[in-house]
Amino acid sequence: MSKQSPVLLVDQAAAMRAATLVELGIQGPLSRAQLARQLGVSPALMTSVTKQLLGEGLIRELEETAGVTGRPARLLDLRADAGRAIGVKVGPSDITCVSVSVNGHINRTSRDPYEAQATAAVSNIVSIVDKFIQGEPDDRLLGIGVGVPGTVDQQSSGSVDSWQLGWSRMPIGSALQNKFNLPVFVENNVNGLAHAERLFGEGRRSREFLMVTLGTGIGAAIVREGVVQTGATGAIGEIGHFPTDHVDKKCTCGGSGCLEAVIGERALLDKAISKKLIRSQAGIENLVQLADSGNEQAQRIFSEAGHILGRFMSGLVHTVDPEVIYLSGEGTLAWEHWSLGFEPAFRETLLPSRRGIRVHVEPWRDENWAQGAAALVLTHPREINSSAGGIWGADVRRRLLANSASSVNVLDDE
């Protein structure tokens, strides 16, 4: 009796097809067996799905074979561009927009001045995004992701609370959805970076990791079993507001002694100013340059901050038990100075069984925050569960399949 191909419900079949397309877009050419392992499904199911995609002309079989022992396995690849996501990073004084392909490549970028506490803060975001989207082909867009330094109720509704931006229940998601009629996902910017790490970075090799960011604030994202955690109110990972003994340090959140009030960018600058190392109007880049030039007092400011961070992160490792830690954010541009205090404090306070945990420092560029926001869109087609992301997740999957089909039709016409 011959084996029957797996039968899927319509929504499940669409989710599987979309997941296969985005996996090929992210990873590049893969064999059927590799796809099955990456997506956690049976080889029989993957054979059925790829057969349909081949029949529709959305993917192609390459002459190249996977480097495995035994019977050679043909590699599969996308036939055309599967679409793009718009990523938006919102800061207190500027907004960065990027256009990102499914493979994580940044196609275009822009930065505009912005006043987060202006009366027209929401409509100004819409205007800036609208101007940027004018440069994109309409039939390529999968959705918009927005990264903010704050707490978001749900990605799909996108109501934001942020003490850094001075926002309370700011309706960013609904404003963008109403204007563009596109899927919109709003999330804490560190969680966005973790999604990008899972899709495009070293994090593809790990299902359990911590993403920690250094900069104006100190933030973290927790990835468990390949899923970025959010917590009961969307505020998981706010490690910058972990209390320390430095109760004399006032924090932007209204409290005192918070971790970021002690080792955040503003705290480091204030210490340098008090020591007359830099002028009061100087920025963090001036302090970094001073440390790079060999100034021992400047180097000590970073090293002491690294010591405090190392002890704190030791406790975080014992609590969360990750496989690896990724460090990112603009603060890592001075990591060689942070690390002098961080490494001994971190390793010595870990349990012996955990002292070998890897800390990977990510190369930083300003567009990383916005690319992380775009990853909020691109992560949804990768989810096999057809209900992932709700109605907007389903719309991203539908757009991905439609875009792929229209691209192939254009290729065939040519």
Image (cartoon, rainbow, N blue to C red):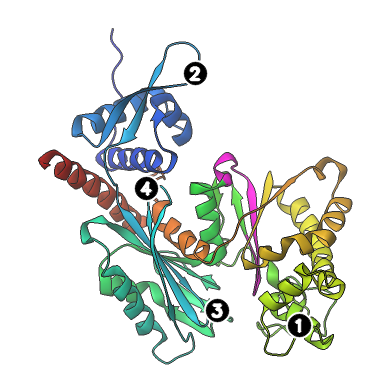
Mark 1 crowd level (few <14, some 14–19, many ≥20, 10 Å Cα): some
Viewer-proximal residue among 153 and 57 = 57
Which residue in the protein does label 4 denote?
Answer: 381
At 65% from the left and 82% from the top, the residue drawn is 253
Look at the numbered disc 3 and give the secondary structure of its residue.
Answer: strand
Q: CA distance from mark 3 to mark 2?
A: 50 Å
Disc on the earlier residue, 2 or 1: 2
Q: Which mark is residue 335?
A: none
Give the extent of the magenta segment.
202-220
| Residue 218, percent from left and from top | 67, 69
What's the amino acid at mark 1? Ser
Q: Are marks 4 and 3 in contact (CB under 8 Å)?
A: no
Which residue in the protein does label 2 denote?
Answer: 68
Q: Which mark is residue 162?
A: 3
What's the amino acid at mark 4? Pro
Residue 7 visible in image:
no
Which residue in the protein does label 1 denote?
Answer: 256
| Residue 19, percent from left and from top | 37, 41
